[in-house]
Image: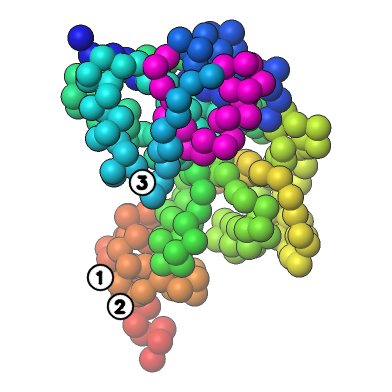
C-alpha cells in the first residue's frame, strides 16, 4: 500500500508558531523532503525529532522528485517542508505535489504559517481581493513583461523580495505603476518585525545604496474605484512599455489587450513616433 505525502507548514520566524499537528507529522513520518536540510535540522533539534531527510530544492527537483515518489509508492510516508511557511508557494515543492497527484498518491495538508496572508492581515490595505505575484524575475525581459502586465491590475498585489533587491524593485514598481499606497513588511513574526505604510513615490529611491537585512513582503493597493471607469489610452500605454525596454511589437500587443484598441493602430502610432 502506498504511503502519503504530508505538506507541512513550518514557522516563518517564531518557532512558537509550529503547530502540534505539524510536530506530530514530522515525528511520525518515515522521512522528510526539505528545501534546505540544515534549516530543517534546527527545527527538528528544537522539537527533539530525529528523522532522515532528503534534500529537495530548485536545482535537484527533477532528479529527486521521482526518487521521493518511488519511496512513497513503496509505502513510506513523507513530510514535505520548505525553509519557512507553506511548501509549494513560490517553491519547487509544487512539482512534488503534482507528481504525487498524477501517480494517485494521497496528499494531505498540515496547514501552518504563510507570509502572504500574515502580511496581508497586518498591512491595513484592502486585501478583500488580492493577486500574489511572488518574486519578480531577475531576467530583465521577463521582469519587464511581468511589470507591464500589472499596469491595469484591479486587485491589491503582494510581492516577496530579498533585501539586496528591494531598492531596485521599488524603483521599478514606481516607474511602472505610478504612485500607489503600499505597505513594506519586514521580518514577519521575528524580533524586528515592522510594517512601513508609505507610497511608491516616497519609497522609490529611499533604499538606494543602503545595505538591508531580512526578508520583505511588499503590498501595493489596487487602482482606486474612480479609475475603473476610465478608458485606457493604448498608445500611451504602449509607449510606456517601450520606454521600459519592451519591443514595439510586444508593447503594441499587450497594450491592445489592455485597452481594446487594435494592435495595428497602436503599432503604427509607435513607428510613426520613431520617425
Q: CA distance from mark 2 to mark 3?
A: 47 Å
- Residue 239 appears in the figure: no
Q: What is the x, y in percent for residue 181?
A: 69, 45
Q: CA distance from mark 3 to mark 1?
A: 45 Å
Q: Which mark is residue 60?
A: 3
Snapshot quadrant of residue 245 = bottom left
* Marks 3 & 1, CB-CB < 8 Å contact: no
- Badge 2 element: helix
Picture residue at 78% right of the left edge, 62% below the top: 210
Q: Which mark is residue 268?
A: 2
Q: What is the x, y in percent for residue 195?
A: 76, 37
Q: What is the x, y in percent for residue 70?
A: 23, 27
Question: Where's the C terminus, which quadrant?
Answer: bottom left
Choose the circle earlier in sequence order: 2 or 3: 3
Whether the magenta-drawn stretch holds residue 103 is answered as no
Picture residue at 45% right of the left edge, 10% below the top: 28
Classify residue 48 as left or right of residue 28.
right
Task: Please tell me whether residue 31 is drawn above or below residue 216 in the rendered image.
Answer: above
5 or 76, nearer to the observer: 76
* Marks 2 & 3, CB-CB < 8 Å contact: no
- Residue 273 appears in the figure: yes
Classify residue 31 as left or right of residue 210.
left
Classify residue 265 as left or right of residue 50.
left
Q: Which mark is residue 264?
A: 1
Amino acid at each position: 500500500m502506498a504511503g502519503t505525502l504530508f505538506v507541512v507548514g513550518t514557522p516563518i520566524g517564531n518557532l512558537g508558531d509550529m503547530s502540534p499537528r505539524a510536530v506530530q507529522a514530522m515525528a511520525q513520518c518515515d522521512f522528510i523532503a526539505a528545501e534546505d536540510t540544515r534549516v530543517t535540522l534546527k527545527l527538528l533539534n528544537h522539537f527533539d525529532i530525529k528523522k532522515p531527510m532528503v534534500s529537495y530544492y530548485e536545482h535537484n527537483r527533477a532528479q529527486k522528485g521521482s526518487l521521493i515518489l518511488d519511496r512513497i509508492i513503496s509505502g513510506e510516508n513523507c513530510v514535505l517542508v520548505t525553509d519557512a511557511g507553506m511548501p509549494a508557494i513560490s517553491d519547487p515543492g509544487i512539482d512534488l505535489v503534482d507528481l504525487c497527484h498524477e501517480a494517485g498518491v494521497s496528499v494531505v495538508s498540515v496547514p501552518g504559517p504563510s507570509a502572504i496572508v500574515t502580511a496581508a492581515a497586518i498591512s491595513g490595505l484592502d486585501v478583500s481581493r488580492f493577486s500574489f505575484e511572488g518574486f519578480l524575475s531577475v531576467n530583465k525581459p521577463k521582469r519587464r513583461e511581468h511589470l507591464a502586465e500589472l499596469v491595469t491590475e484591479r486587485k491589491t498585489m503582494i510581492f516577496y523580495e530579498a533585501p539586496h533587491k528591494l531598492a531596485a524593485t521599488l524603483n521599478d514598481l514606481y516607474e511602472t505603476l505610478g504612485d500607489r499606497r503600499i505597505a513594506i513588511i519586514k521580518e514577519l513574526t521575528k524580533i524586528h518585525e515592522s510594517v512601513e505604510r508609505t507610497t511608491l513615490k516616497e519609497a522609490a529611491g529611499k533604499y538606494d545604496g543602503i545595505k538591508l537585512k531580512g526578508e520583505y513582503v511588499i503590498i501595493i493597493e489596487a487602482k482606486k474605484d474612480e479609475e475603473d471607469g476610465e478608458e485606457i489610452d493604448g498608445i500611451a500605454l504602449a509607449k510606456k512599455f517601450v520606454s521600459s525596454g519592451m519591443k514595439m511589437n510586444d508593447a503594441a500587443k499587450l497594450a491592445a489587450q489592455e485597452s481594446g484598441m487594435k494592435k495595428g493602430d497602436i503599432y503604427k502610432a509607435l513607428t510613426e513616433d520613431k520617425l
